Image (cartoon, grey):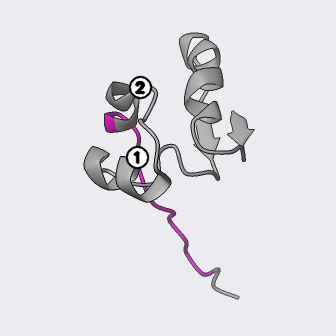
Amino acid sequence: MVLFALPTGLTTELSKKFLDNGSKIIDFGADFRLNNQQDQEQIYNKKHPNWEMSKEASQGIYYQKSKL
């Protein structure tokens, strides 16, 4: 598992080699935050470097309170 928290665009560029080696990626940045390309590019004012990769990403965080 590889964690990223980089400026917009860098995670997409750097994560491919890790994904090719079978690693899972968690991105705390914005590269995979939105599931609409037009929204992504308008909000962050730059073209997404690999939208196909973004379409395969899972957005969101699952949280479950522990039962104590």
| Residue at image mark 1 | 58
Identify the residue at image location x=34%, y=33%.
Answer: 56
Q: Read off the magenta span.
A: 55-65
Query: Of 1 and 5, which appears nearest the observer?
Result: 5
State the CA–CA distance, disc 2 to disc 1.
Answer: 15 Å
Quadrant the C terminus occupies: bottom right
Q: Residue furthest front?
A: 45
**Is residue 32 found left or right of 18 in the rendered image?**
left
Confirm whether the magenta stretch covers residue 17: no
Q: Residues within 10 Å of mark 2 (few under 14, many from 20)?
A: few
Q: Residue at x 46, y 27 (%)?
A: 49
Left or right? Give the position of 37 relative to 16: left
> Secondary structure of the magenta portion, mostly?
loop
* Secondary structure of residue under mark 2: loop
Residue 14 position, x and y percent, is 65, 23
Label 1: few (<14), some (14–19) or many (≥20) C-alpha neighbours in 10 Å? few
Residue 42 in the image: above or below residue 25: below
The quadrant where residue 65 appears: bottom right
Give the labeled residue for mark 2. 50
Please say if 19 is above or below 47.
above
Q: Amino acid at mark 2?
A: Asn
Q: Residue furthest bottom?
A: 68
- Return the disc, 2 or 1, that comes first in the chain's sequence: 2
Q: Residue at x 50, y 65 (%)?
A: 62
Identified at 72% across, 47% down, the residue is 5
Q: Secondary structure at mark 1?
A: loop
Amino acid bearing label 1: Ser
Q: Nearer the viewer, mark 2 or mark 1?
A: 2
Report the front residue among 45 and 20. Answer: 45
